[in-house]
Image: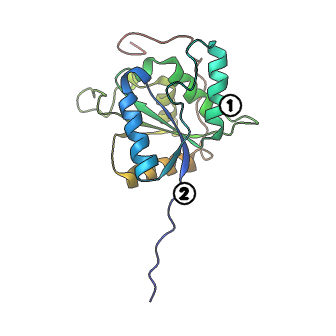
Amino acid sequence: MFGFSPPPKPRHKVFVSYHHANDQHYRDSFEELFANQHDIMLSRSVQIGDIPENMKTETIRQKIRDEYLRDSTVTVVLVGSQTWQRKHVDWEIGSSIRHTLHNPRSGLLGILLPTYVKPGPNKYDLYTIPPRLHYNIECGFANLYDWSNDPSKVQAWIHQAFLQRDKKAPDNTLDSFANNRTGDRWYS
């Protein structure tokens, strides 16, 4: 008698958004584990050196949107202690959840890195994660998880975000960051 096994979950094209200066190690580990070792995703992320630093802001935004996000189906935000301050993270989230003629909407999820400091027993301090991610967790479009090396968990998270992208409307009402931010929180 033949046993039945469910079909494997499909691999999704994943764009990883993160704080380059602080969390490069975790982005590299995430892609090594889940794109290379366990083959549960295809990376569509910007690599160091892909975009010249001297480009104009609007050119950088357009390049990321048209060359990287266009081909992705899920955006994963790696949330460290200062990720919320980064204008590029805000732009990447905003662009990925916007549905346009040439760029369909991506699913969205956040993963709290081991470097993220939790305030006591709470899961997270909503004012120390990217505000656009927080608004989308609140409206049910995105979810937030703790870091895991378990490929079956991460694959399930990515697949859930992919399925959810057309079931709920995202919240993209915030004005885009004009600059990186400073301080301990985005709202006091």
Q: Amino acid at mark 2?
A: Pro
Residue 24: give its label.
none
| Mark closer to the chain start, 2 or 1 | 2
Whether 3 is drawn above or below 17: the answer is below
In the picture, which quadrant includes the C terminus? top left
Q: Residue at x 37, y 39 (%)?
A: 29
Whether 171 is drawn above or below 166: the answer is above
In the picture, which quadrant includes the N terminus? bottom left
Under circle 1, the secondary element is helix
Residue 66: give its label.
1
The answer to whether residue 162 shows anywhere in this view is yes
Q: Amino acid at mark 1?
A: Asp
Q: Residue at x 61, y 24 (%)?
A: 173
Residue 145 percent location from the top left of the image: 38, 40
Residue 10: give its label.
2
Under circle 2, the secondary element is loop
Residue 60 percent location from the top left of the image: 62, 20
Left or right: 25 in relation to 105: left
Number of other residues with Cα within 10 Å of mark 1, as a class: few under 14, some 14 to 19, many 20 or more: some
Residue found at the very far bottom of the displayed protein:
1
